Image (spheres, rainbow, N blue to C red):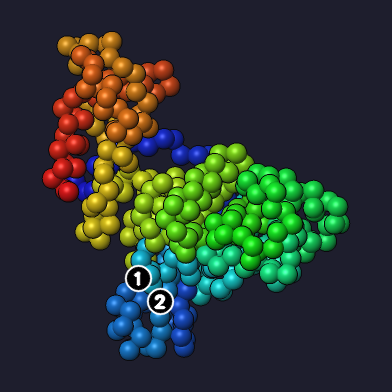
Amino acid sequence: MTAMETQPATAATKTDEPAISVRSLWKVFGPNAQSIVGSPDARLPRAELRAKTGCTAAVVDVSFDVAPGEVFVVMGLSGSGKSTLVRCLTRLIEPTAGDITLEGTDLMKMDLKALRDVRRHKFSMVFQHFGLLPNRKVIDNVAYGLEIRGQGKTERREKAQSVIDLVGLQGYEMAYPDQLSGGMQQRVGLARALAVDPDIMFFDEPFSALDPLIRRGMQDEVLRLHHEVGKTMVFITHDLSEALKLGDRIVIMRDGAVVQMGTPDELVGAPADDYVRDFVRDVPKSHVMTVRWIMRDQTPDDSVDGPELSPDMVIRDAIRPILDGGSPGRVVEDGKVIGLVDRTGVLSVIAAQESDA
């Protein structure tokens, strides 16, 4: 049985049209790049491909859908192709081949005028380097995208103020960027991206230059804002803990290709290969995996008065109710008991955690 076959059933697939749909996307840098697409040479190690053809395959035959309202994380080490991928999704870099649709509209067929309009109205980007205008106050930096759209000063300042309040920058409206800390500057960048009310937000390693405490605070801020405004988010990172914290689903890339795609508990519970297994080795499984992974079928001898658990509850949160109770926990979904979790299941995860340490 393969790793993917051992994964538990997940929630029903969303029936909405994808916010983003990507099919067979390639980006090859170098001469005669098109000839590399789909060829056996594309699977050569990068150094061999460069030596043989002078080309670098930065994104290799990547396909996925992003659901409306989803936080979709793309992660990998430096050189994995993740940042090139997100730039292809916005056509800041032109893909060599493949299809990209944005809410059903073919992004690859758009001319420059249509593409500029989409960038102004449909999506926004938050980068690692804030890109704030040093000679403009916070409120005018936040309102910049609205100014580009041609909105009047009063209207755009009202909108900018509402977003400044949303990200917790009240009182700093008249400050200049160099008067703010790094974390506060990143809040300005986040507010600027939100001010244009995009359908989709792209984050390219926005917090990697921040101190750890500030970084965690900004991650919490993104989660809070996502809960409040419900934007579709594509988040690029090289940090596994950040990916697990933020992502509804995660793609792990290596050498331009997708190694595995799944929910955080799927990646930790059933890594597709040794590369992913090495990535997640130090992750406490009980902090990520849900009780779906350890539930078992109910038998006639089981008591039915144990604690009620959600199938999406992480195992860590189920440990105390299970160990303190005299009966297995009942995993309930849509009012129906779909399985039981007992002491043996919980302790097996804790034991596996200890052996991996």
Q: Quadrant of residue 124?
A: bottom right
Q: Position of residue 284 (x, y in %)?
A: 26, 44
Residue bearing the label numbered 1: 255
* Total numbered badges shown on the rendered structure: 2
Of 194 and 52, nearer the camera is: 194
Q: Are marks 1 and 2 in contact (CB under 8 Å)?
A: yes
Secondary structure under the numbered disc 1 in the rendered image: loop
Against 344, residue 337 (above or below) is above
Q: Residue at x 23, y 16 (%)?
A: 325
Looking at numbered disc 1 in the image, what kind of residue is underneath it?
Asp
Would residue 290 appear left or right of 18 to someone viewing this image?
Answer: left
Q: What residue do we see at 56% from left, 73% from top?
A: 93
Q: Residue furthest front?
A: 179
Which residue is labeled 2 in the image?
Answer: 57
Query: Tag 2: residue type?
Result: Ala
Quadrant in the rendering for residue 87: bottom right
Q: Is residue 21 visible?
A: no
Please state the horizontal and vertical placement of residue 121, each as a whole percent of the image. 71, 57
Q: Residue at x 44, y 35 (%)?
A: 12
Residue 103, relative to residue 299: is it above or below?
below
Query: Dot 2, crowdedness within 10 Å: few (<14), some or many (≥20)?
Result: many
Q: Residue at x 59, y 56 (%)?
A: 184
Q: Earlier in the sequence, mark 1 or mark 2?
A: 2
Between marks 1 and 2, how big is the CA–CA gap?
Answer: 8 Å
Q: Position of residue 131 (x, y in %)?
A: 62, 68
Q: Position of residue 309 (x, y in %)?
A: 34, 23
